[in-house]
Image: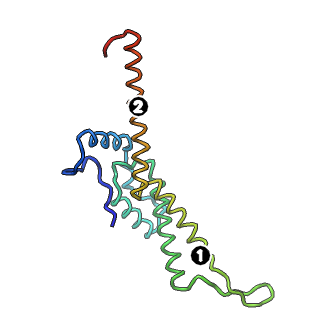
Amino acid sequence: MVQPFKSSFDIEGHKISKAELKELQAIELALSGNSEDLKNIPPTLNALGRAYYITNLSNMNKATLSNLDKSLLEALANTQARLEVANEYLNEHGTLMHTKDSRGNEVVKEHPYVKQVKDMTEQLLKLSAKLGLSPVDRAGMSRSVSNEVVAQQNKKFNEYDNRLSDGEGWL
């Protein structure tokens, strides 16, 4: 089972250098934002969607979430709720349905819920990736922010080097 993502501020006793820990904390701070509104459950969710919203939020690292993520969290919970209902229906009734064509002949077709389940599963995977719900997604988010932090640091060093070469002296 995959362990939940821990904040770098919660890491203790791991074999990580102080420099690496500081870099991880800088990355986390760069990702963090105001997340006060996330605790207000969107009124558009049904009971099952609200349960998923609460579960998702309680299992996510709030240090990497902001109020801007609320619509993604809402869409994720809504998709999970609808997917569960559609899967329950298909499990009970099967993936095929019997209908009649225009001539009155009985025809066996794939139930429309099958396509909806496929579409919702794709949407769920995309939303999960945007929120960093898998270890691979979290690593990708960390790398992109890490590259930004490194670029910012390089810019500062370049500005410092330029001042030195211009004869402005030390900081």
Q: Indicate how the structure is coloured in the image.
A: rainbow
In the image: residue 19, left or right of residue 102: left
Q: Quadrant of residue 162?
A: top left
- Position above or below: 158 against 132: above
Q: Residue at x 45, y 57 (%)?
A: 73
Q: Earlier in the sequence, mark 2 or mark 1?
A: 1
Mark sitting on residue 14:
none
Q: Nearer the viewer, residue 4 or 51?
A: 4
Distance from label 2 to label 1 (Cα)? 48 Å
Q: Quadrant of residue 96?
A: bottom right
Q: Where is residue 98 drawn, in percent x and y?
A: 66, 87
Q: Where is residue 126 drawn, in percent x and y?
A: 51, 58
Q: Residue at x 20, y 50 (%)?
A: 12
Q: Residue at x 47, y 69 (%)?
A: 81
Q: Residue at x 55, y 71 (%)?
A: 117
Three-letter amino acid code at disc 2?
Gln
- Position above or below: 111 against 3: below
Three-letter amino acid code at disc 1?
Val
Pointer 2 residue: 152
